[in-house]
Image (cartoon, rainbow, N blue to C red):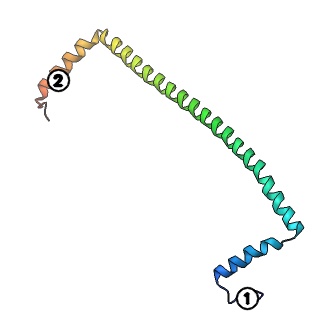
Amino acid sequence: MKDYLDYNEATTWERLKYSLKSWRYIGVGKSLLIWFLAISFVPLATVSFINFLNAYQGLTIVAEKSLIASSQLRVSYIYTFFDEATDFLDVTEESPYKNELLKHLQESYDSSGLDAAA
């Protein structure tokens, strides 16, 4: 059995097993670096998660307010349209020329000889 690993002849499992065994002998500097990175990951993840929650909540509130405002505006436009249509019908109903116009249209239609289905 060899004391070393020949990477050209070794299988993937042997390479992985050798790499895991070699982690025990990494030295003080690399060990401190790995522990520093591992310990600093916890506050980083915590701050990132809190920031995500705040941003999500803020954007949700803004989207909800925007949706409510636009829907209220559309309802206002619809009410205005029907109010103006009602006002227009009231004005045309009170017009003295309405009956004359309708009589003229009926006479013109009767004299044209057109069929209503056409």
* Residue that appears at 11% across and 31% down: 115
The one of 36 and 114 positioned closer to us in this rendering: 36
* Residue that appears at 70% across and 89% down: 8
**Above-or-below relation of 41 to 92:** below
Q: Position of residue 62 (x, y in %)?
A: 61, 33
Question: Nearer the N terminus, badge 1 or badge 2?
Answer: 1
Please give left or right for residue 96 compared with residue 18 in the image: left
Instruction: Give the farthest residue toward the right.
Output: 29
Q: Secondary structure at mark 1?
A: loop
Q: What residue did someone put label 1 on?
A: 6
Quadrant of the drawing holding the C terminus: top left
* Residue that appears at 23% across and 13% down: 100
**Above-or-below relation of 24 to 95:** below
The one of 110 and 39 positioned closer to us in this rendering: 39
Q: Amino acid at mark 1?
A: Asp
* Disc 1: CA contacts within 10 A as few (<14), some (14-19) or many (>=20): few
Q: Quadrant of residue 103?
A: top left
Q: Position of residue 29 (x, y in %)?
A: 89, 66
Instruction: Give the farthest residue toward the front.
Output: 1
Q: What residue did someone put label 2 on?
A: 108
